[in-house]
Structure formats: C-alpha cells, structure tokens
Amino acid sequence: MPRRVTSALPNQFGCGIHNTLARSTMSQLSYVGADTSSPWHTYLSQVDRVLPYLGPLARWSETLKRPKRALIVDVPIEMDDGSVAHFEGYRVQHNLSRGPGKGGVRYHPDVTLEEVMALSAWMTVKCAAVNLPYGGAKGGIRVDPKKLSLKELERMTRRYTSEIGIIIGPQQDIPAPDVNTNAQIMAWMMDTYSMNIGGTATGVVTGKPLHLGGSLGRVKATGRGVFVTGREAARRLNLPLEGARIAVQGMGNVGGAAAELFVQAGARLVAVQDHTGTLVNPNGFDIADAMAVLKRDGGIANYREAERIEDEAFWDVDCDILIPAALESQLTPARAARVKAKLVLEGANGPTLPAADDVLAERGILVVPDVICNAGGVTVSYFEWVQDFSSFFWSEDEINLRLDRIMVDALKKIWDTADRHRISLRTATFAVACERILIAREERGLYP
C-alpha cells in the first residue's frame, strides 16, 4: 500500500507547507508518485524523459521536481443562512527562477494539492516555452461554486485572497482565471489585495474586466493559441483546414474559441463533448447556433442538429483533429488506441497520460502538447500585466498579431529541436523550456 504523507512531507515535496500542514487534505494525500495516473506523476514522467537532452544542466534537474513553495489555507466564510462553512484552498509556486509566479485559480470539488502542484509545474514549463519572464504557479479551492450564492462566492474569494496575500503580488505571483473562475472573481481578488496593501494594484491578477485594467483579447486567447499552433501543425502534416473534421472535448473559453476559429478557417466541427453530454454531426455543427445554446444553457446537450451518443464513444469519432480541452488525464492508453484523428491539440492541461503519448506516437498521430498548445492564455496575460504597469493599452488587433507571432516563433524553435533530436514535440518543448529554466537557476546561484 502507498504510504501516507506525514511529517516528512517537506522533504518529499521539497518545499515548506505553511498554515494547515496537518489538515484533512494532507492526511488523505497519498505519497507523491504512487498513483501513476495522477497529474503530478504525469509531470514527473515528462521531466524524466527530457533529462538526456539537458547536458550539464541536468545537475539542477531536481529543481524541476520540487515545488519552491506550497501554501494550504483554511477559508472560513459565513453562509447566507448564518452558518459558517470551511473550504480548503491552495497556492503553489513551483519555480520562480525566471520571474514572478504566474498561474490560474480554479474552483472545483476535486481540487487537490497534488493536482495544483502539477498545474503549477506545467505553468513553469509553459511560460519558459514561449519565453515569458515568469515562473509557474497555480491555485485552487476545493468547492463546487454552483452551490454558492453570488455573495457567498464573493466572501469565499475575498477570504482566500487575504489568506494567500502573503505570497502573491505584481512582482511575486500573479493569479488568473481558470476552471470555474472568471473576470468578476479576478476583480474581487484585485480589490481585496489592493485594500489590504492600501493602494490599487491592478497588476496583481490578470484576466480582469477591461475597465479595471484587463486586456482586450484575453478571454479567447487560450483558444486562439490552440488554433494558431494547430494551423501550423496542420501545415506540417499537409492537412488542409478547409473541410477538416474537428472533435472538441470541453466547449468553454478554450475549446469553444478554438472551435469557432477552426470553423472560420473552413473546418467542420463534427463532435462535441462537455459535462452535459456528447453530440455528433458528420455534416458539421452550425457554430453560431451551438455557441448560442452553450451561452443560454451552460452546456451543449440541447443543441438540436446533432445526434447524442454515449460519452465514451466520443473517442471513436471519425475526425482529423482532436482537441481535448476539458480536464487532466482524459486520454488514457485505451482511448489513445481508438483515436482516429491525425492531430491532437491539447487545449487542456495534462489531458494525455504518458503511456497514452506512447500509443499515439506508435500510431503516427501527432500531439501538440499543452505546454505550447494552450500557452496563448498566459501570453496575453503577460500582455495585460505589461499594459497595467505602463497604463498604456493596445488594440485587439495588435494583441492578436503579437500573440500569433510569439506562438509561431516558439513552435518553430520547438519543432527544430524535435527534428534535430528526433523526439516528440512534448519532449522537445520540455527540452527548450527546461534549458531556459535551469540556465536561470544556475546563473542566479544558490542563496545563502
């Protein structure tokens, strides 16, 4: 049986755990690496695969496997009925060698410390892959936000922000929206942090409303990045986008925006899966109608011009491009053996297990990995952060052009690395990113 994390936890994780060290979450968390399907195990496996390509920098490789700092906080709030509820929150800073931490905050009933650790590590790699001056961080609260009123959600957000306020800041760690969080939640976080320091700090979060220092183009930036990298990959495969069949899992800001852009480029959206069901139409969805249903109902289930199928049958759909844009660990080896696509674009973080990666490679299916494919969001977050510091804001066309150029240049360097070493795009992305991270670590040295 896997042993449980005990007082030896800081050594196993390589970081100090502050506040509620021995709370219920820690007693439930299995030894890191025991669950081979866990996000953290997936990340560690990806790091192990890149070590042969790091040369002398490999001496610093343990830096990549140990989060710098993890904060666990109790988030008590008064509910509308007068009762007091407690929620558990996290903020993990994986690596700060290249700059302040950057990463979203998610509200989800299945959030765990181990998941947040993995997401923060992927943010470190992602920021370095597109050469942004950031390290990686991530946060979350274990909660079902749909069960909270708007006022309860605000109180929880403000209390969480106050609790993690000791480690966040415009030059320390900059949160952003993620699963079940949005511009309104970022506004509450910015206001809370600002009130606590006694001055307005717009740069403490990104993904804010426009009139509070948000950036044009931010909402659809991650999906746009998926489209840009997908477009470039399709060119490499000689796969025309005109008439290409697209299947998307998850139709939120990432999957929905990517689907719209692919359809605008002439592709057909033939399958969609979200939390409400799985629908297929070989002739293609009417994207405007589908997005209207999503906006109205919060899910795709009531879209009429498609056939409903079993959720597991999604992985059998005939398509050219598959976009997993939901949660982690969706592409298992068994599902990878059934995929009919020529190209997989990882809109989600960590959707493919390492063993599934091998299956896809053996079948000749190209995977554009999450750490470059979905980096459009953090890239435009960087633009927002820069605009906040200068109080000078760009047009949406300028932002989209800058995003396109950064994504294309980053993917070209990664592809050149993959060709030179004859390795997968994922390993090449890690090679490029980890080299940058570890050079920064080596040049900064150890203090004291």
Image (tube, rainbow, N blue to C red):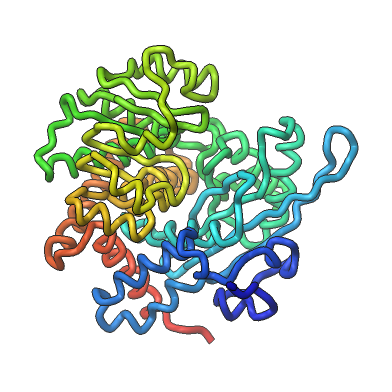
Which residue shows up at 26% across the image and 21% down it?
Answer: 282
Q: Position of residue 84 (x, y in %)?
A: 86, 45
Which residue shows up at 64% across the image and 72% down it?
Answer: 4
Which residue shows up at 72% across the image and 69% down it?
Answer: 21
Which residue shows up at 14% across the image and 64% down it?
Answer: 422
The correct choice, above or below, for 50 with respect to 131 in the image is below
Residue, far left:
238
Residue in the foreground of this view, choosing between 253 and 168: 253
Residue in the foreground of this view, choosing between 30 and 237: 30
Q: Position of residue 230 (x, y in %)?
A: 24, 40
Residue, far right:
82
Asked whether, in this view, residue 103 is left or right of residue 56, the answer is right
Quarter of the picture holding the N terminus: bottom right
The correct choice, above or below, for 60 with respect to 345 in the image is below
Residue 387: quarter of image: top left
Q: How many marks?
A: 0
Asked whether, in this view, residue 19 is left or right of residue 114, the answer is right
Residue in the foreground of this view, choosing between 358 and 256: 358
Report whether residue 136 is seen: no
Residue 267: quarter of image: top left
Q: Position of residue 109 (x, y in %)?
A: 64, 45
Report whether residue 369 is seen: yes
Residue, far bottom:
448
Quarter of the picture holding the C terminus: bottom right
Q: Position of residue 143 (x, y in %)?
A: 68, 44
